[in-house]
Amino acid sequence: MHVGFIFLAVIVGSVLFHIFTPWYWTDIASNWGSMDDTITLTFWVGGGVFVAVCLFMVYCVFRFSYKEGRKAEYKPEDKKLEKILTWSTTLGVAALLAPGLIVWNQYINVPKNAIDVDVMAWQWGWQYRLPGEDGKLGSTKVENINDNNPFGIILEDINGKDDVLIQSDVLHLKNNRPVKILLRSVDVLHNWYVPQFRAKMDAVPGTITYYWFEPNKVGEYEVLCAEYCGVGHYGMRGRVFVKSEQDYKNWIEEQETFSDLIAKQKEIEFSEKKLAKNNLND
Amino acid sequence: MSSDPKIKGYEFKPGYSGMAADTASDQTMFKGVHWGKAMMWIFLLSDTFIFSCFLISYMKGRGSTPVEWPNPSEVFALNAFGVPVPLLLIAIMTFVLITSSGTMALAVKYGYERNRKMCGWLILATAIGGLTFVGMQAFEWSKLIHEGVRPWENPFGAKQFGSFFFMITGFHGTHVSIGVIFLFIYAYKTFAGHYDKEKRGWFTSMKGNYVEIEILGLYWHFVDLVWVFIFAFFYLW
Amino acid sequence: MSEDFNDSKTIQAQSSETISGGGATPTPDIDYVRPAELPDQDLYHGHSFITKWVFCQDAKVIGVQYFLLATFTGIIGLILSWLMRLQLGFPGAAGFMTAEHYYQFVTMHGMIMVVYFLTALFLGGFGNYLIPLMTGARDMVFPYVNMVSFWMFFVAVGVLLASFFVPGGPTGSGWTLYPPQAILEGTPGSGMGIILMCVSLILFVAGFTMGGLNYLITVLQARTRGMTLMRMPLTVWGIFTATVLAMLAFPALLVSALMMTLDKVLETSFFMPTILKAGEVLEYGGGTPILFQHLFWFFGHPEVYIVALPAFGIISDLISVHSRKNIFGYRMMVWAIVVIGALSFFVWAHHMYVSGMHPWFGFFFATTTLIIAVPTAMKVYNWVLTLWRGNIRLNTVMLWCLGFIVTFVNGGITGIFLGNVTVDVPLSDTYFVVAHFHMVMGIAPLMVIMGAVYHWFPLVAGRMLSEKLGKWHFWITFLGAYSIYFPMHYLGFIGVPRRYFEMYDSPYITSAVGMNQFISTAAFIVGAAQFILIYNIIVSLKIGKPAGKNPWQANSLEWLTPTVPPEHGNWGDKLPVVHRWPYDYSVPGAKEDFIPQTTPPSEVVETKVEKT
């Protein structure tokens, strides 16, 4: 008898744990509430099946445990029952799959008004690039990356001139405005993941991947790398600030653009040359 | 060999219903098929997956590399009498290998006829055909290496050309070489009469049987077939 | 081997029983079984210690060798998991634990447990021991090749363990070995470690292929008289289908391991795009890392079922024997195994929803993945329906079966979360994934292995294991393992990413510290509890109750050998003849509650057997 009771306790305990757990998802801060809804739906259906099957098992343990001389039923098959179970399972699975596919369709189709954000990853850090007034990011090339061109922007591309460069792991986003995260990596796989936004995608060297979300809660969030990328993986963090329109505007105006950077470098080069010349003249 | 073997108490049915009946019967699924032969077929199925993975990787790699792929009819051209003839060597190699498949098939035939001498000579001929193929492949490799193609670099274009070429032809060449070694061993065993005398094998202590030649033949035909695919994917695409 | 049937000879029949057909009125003999197609197998009998116990050609000895070596590597994997849990629960408690070590342990734990422990144990161990016995063969069809298979595995394990002692240590790139990081500096063991790992995998695949061919041909071509495919125990069906999967899936692993080795050793660029490392562009260029992921998971997902299908098969037999009832819906169970096996080749990219592959793949792979849930659910229903109106012996074996059902259903349900593409997005690469696959392909198959050990130990050793120790072992393992992995799902909901050496003080992670300590403590206890089994085995070998013949009153052939434990050649002078399926338990009208497969119908005329 104790066997049945312990299994019963395990099942009841699981349900109670789920109801009273202090550990559950972090408060959502993006438009992907639909993802949470699909999880909840799967929880109800799946949890229901789990409890039903296990309770049935426990009942059998109570009711049919060994008695000398009793004979088990002899029934190799029950076509009707098997058919009912197959079709109801298929139905349940379809009910879980359909919403999943619908939300996935939203996930891979980016809204037109989304702001592109170039997230560049390396071992082990992040930096970001936002489009300038033209709303377009300049194209890039890994070979172009150097101290003077930290993002490897192709110099001939005019779209790149006014790109806003953020050489730090702190990104600011405008509240209630969709962003399209364009991920690239210069070395190994990475994944730019903010648990509160729910969404994620790997950054793969040699190609650009994307996903989108719409932050809808002003605040500060932590960025984690969610794809193993070597020994510094666990320390590869960043931060995101979601800001109101005005705060965001103030912030972005302070940032440096690519042409600012080039100008600054020319100035430095120029002054260095001048310095060298002066030294020579002396 | 094409007719169904006689099995006491078992009636063969034609067509799909026969297949279903064989499957549903006891003891064996493939009636009268030697264990070793069945084993070789399944091994070859597995090997097919290996070569498919190689060739699919090749297609993916060729499709996604940003640098241009070299033109095969230029890279693989051979100078004959001062004129570069595209694919000349490969054509000869392919011809030799396919011919060796023919001699192998004849060897199997003579084996089942218990014609020891003919069988042995034909296996030897197959082995020499295989050896010629490997030799010509070595020549082609050295020509490409001489021209600067390496697994890690390629003066004619995409790096992956060298990588995939050496890897896939190397893997196939290894198959051919292993086949050649076994062909020589089997030729010796045939001439020495191990299959007629049912002499037990040195390692396996199993009795010798001419069916072993057919099993090796299956392997050899498979290796040839794979070459046809490699030929098509590397040289004609 | 003497099955030299040429066309010149007709096949010799062993039996002189009447033959039906041929136009004449058939003799109405209800016990008639077709005569033997094949002559008796010609076996090499070892006669020295070396040929009997070391380089042995007896599948049963090879099975035990596989079992022991796999268990040995499994214990190494267990110790590695302890070290990892120590770091996660109590950061800094083990002084030598650096991030490098942690990642190396993660990698080796994963690879050892999946490939060198579970696969080798189920297919090499149980497959070798049970296939010939359950199908009524004298041995595997090519005993010599079978022996080489084990020794290849031995060398593969040797190479794997050697990587602990090379400069740089074993690879720390995660068990998935994703390039580029697997072969670049910045990942521990990116030098010799990853090379040895690839070499070891290639050796494993080569060795496994030799064994796998044997398992397949033995099932297809060497069954005894009367043993049709649909009279085979589900254990054989599970192992057989898993072997088919392995024969078709391992090629992808072999190819990916070979290409990765070349990328490392010859600096080819199969998987390597242009890479900037420490301010310099490397020699690599033009390759695609995603290709490796496709190849790896084309192996990796069938691999899950290579472990799961034998477990499904074995558990079906154990439940049936110990609830004294036929397995419910045998035909459905067989078809479910076959369908799951076939579908498993079309779902691999569900491991790659957020890998950056073309997003449209998501639709296809989510659909195929959820379709697999249907046959799997049918199997679960049939297991619990087998218990229904049974006569359930609540012994240790049955406890493991019940434990399996709970953990497998739990892990299967979380699989539906992860297989459904949208739900996977927030959960992938978090502890939810870790909890899911440990529950479904760690703990659940382990429950089956344990149940199988308690079930078949009397056959292998001729003595029973202690029930009392067994119950302790079960309860500690089951309750402990459940309390490790059930709460762990909730770490995933919080968003705790996997493969983190340390969490520092991220806001949503501080709440998880207590849970991590609890999980780690439970892991230490569960791991330690496994030594109860080892103790039990050692003691029972000496002083266990003699098992006698067929201690569980089972029907299948392995219990019907003339001697227990069975000798080389299994069946003595005469091969068994099979008259029925292995699930005739509690047949109405029968004197006993079981009818062994070899019982001819004439001996049980009074019974009402629905199907034989």
Image (spheres, helix red, strand yellow):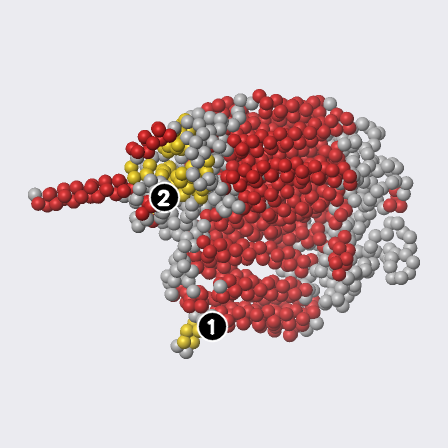
> In this figure, which residue is indicated by the disc labeled 1?
B88
Residues under numbered marks 2 and 1 in contact, where contact means CB atoms less than 8 Å apart: no
- The answer, for residue A47, to whether it is visible in the render is yes
| Secondary-structure class at tag 1 | helix
Residue A17 location in percent, x, y? 59, 23
Position above or below: C14 against B132: above
**Residue B85 in the figure: left or right of residue C612:** left
Q: Nearer the viewer, residue A82 or C35?
A: A82
Chain under label 1?
B
Quadrant of the rendering where the N terminus of chain B is positioned: bottom right
Q: Residues within 10 Å of mark 2 (few under 14, many from 20)?
A: many
Would you place residue C535 above or below residue C237 in this image? above
Residue C348 in the image, given as x and y percentages of width and height: 56, 45
Left or right? Give the position of C361 relative to C3: left
Look at label 2 and name its amino acid.
Leu
Classify residue B168 as left or right of residue B148: right
Quadrant in which residue C536 is drawn: top right
* Residue drawn at x 50%, y 23% as measured from the top left: C514
> Which sits in the foreground, A44 or C355?
A44
Q: Residues within 10 Å of mark 1 (few under 14, many from 20)?
A: some
x and y percentages locating residue C612 in the rendered image: 82, 45
> Secondary structure under badge 2?
loop
Q: Is residue C390 above or below residue B63?
A: above
Label 2: which residue? A137
| Image location of residue A66, percent across then percent down | 78, 28
Compute the Cα span from label 2 to label 1: 50 Å
Specify whether residue C187 is in view.
Answer: no
What residue appears at the point 36 percent right and 39 percent down from the top-left corner? Answer: A130
Q: Is residue C23 above or below residue A20?
A: below
